């Protein structure tokens, strides 16, 4: 298994709130002190939106962002022109998912062994990147 992982919004929210819907493999990855986790900025935006709507046990976006910042295993991937270009042919996915998958593909193109931690059926069934749940 890779030790570098891209996370989608639900993965990081469910992990931080201790949600039982988080897959066993995903939980093991997020519990592993050796895992390097990449959060695409678009996934953080989605998470903040979900928190703002009150659909999670995490009470504020500030609490969420503080927890991310305090854990050195989390890195934030900016949305770059290269990632946007990588997302263009991924029209089978909705916009946010395209950018998360493109971030994973970008990391792979940089030579990193990386998997996307997600349970999103449209992403996992696409076969575009290696996924774990």
Image (tube, rainbow, N blue to C red):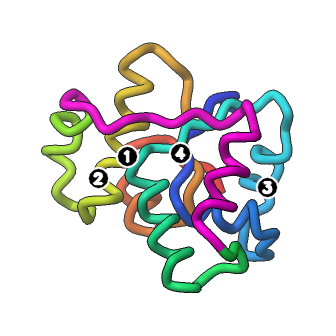
Q: Which mark is residue 27?
A: 3
Lateral position of residue 16 relative to residue 4, left or right: right
Q: Residues within 10 Å of mark 3 (few under 14, many from 20)?
A: many
According to the picture, the residue beneath numbered tag 1 turns out to be 101
As helix, strand or loop, the secondary structure at mark 2 comes to helix
The stretch in magenta equals 60-82
Nearer-N-terminus badge (3/4): 3
Q: Where does the image place residue 48, in percent across and percent down from the top left?
A: 50, 65
What's the residue at 68%, 30% (across, down)? 36
How far apart marks 4 and 2 lie (CA) works out to 12 Å
Q: Residues within 10 Å of mark 2 (few under 14, many from 20)?
A: many
Instruction: Report the front residue among 92 and 95.
Output: 95
How far apart marks 3 and 4 lie (CA) works out to 13 Å
Nearer-N-terminus badge (1/4): 1
How far apart marks 1 and 3 lie (CA) works out to 20 Å
Lateral position of residue 82 relative to residue 77, left or right: left
Nearer-N-terminus badge (1/3): 3
Q: Where does the image place residue 106, in percent across and percent down from the top left?
A: 35, 28
According to the picture, the residue beneath numbered tag 2 turns out to be 98
Q: Are marks 3 and 4 in contact (CB under 8 Å)?
A: no
- Residue 113 against residue 56 in the figure, above or below: above
Work out which quarter of the rendered image holds the C terminus and state it: bottom right
Q: Are marks 4 and 2 in contact (CB under 8 Å)?
A: no
Q: Find the residue positioned furthest to the bottom.
A: 54
Q: Are marks 2 and 1 in contact (CB under 8 Å)?
A: yes
Residue 126 figure quarter: bottom left
How far apart marks 1 and 4 lie (CA) works out to 8 Å
As helix, strand or loop, the secondary structure at mark 4 comes to strand
Q: Are marks 1 and 4 in contact (CB under 8 Å)?
A: yes
Instruction: Report the front residue among 120 and 100.
Output: 100
């Amino acid at each position: 298994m890779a030790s570098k992982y891209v996370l989608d919004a639900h993965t990081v929210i469910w992990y931080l709130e201790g949600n039982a819907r988080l897959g066993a493999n995903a939980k093991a990855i997020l519990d592993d002190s050796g895992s390097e986790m990449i959060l695409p900025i678009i996934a953080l935006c989605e998470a903040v939106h979900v928190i703002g709507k009150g659909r999670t046990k995490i009470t504020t976006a500030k609490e969420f962002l503080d927890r991310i910042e305090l854990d050195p295993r989390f890195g934030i991937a900016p949305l770059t022109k290269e990632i946007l270009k990588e997302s263009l042919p991924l029209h089978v996915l909705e916009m946010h998912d395209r950018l998360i998958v493109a971030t994973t593909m970008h990391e792979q193109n940089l030579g990193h062994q990386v998997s996307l931690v997600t349970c999103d059926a449209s992403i996992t069934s696409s076969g575009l990147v290696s996924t774990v749940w």
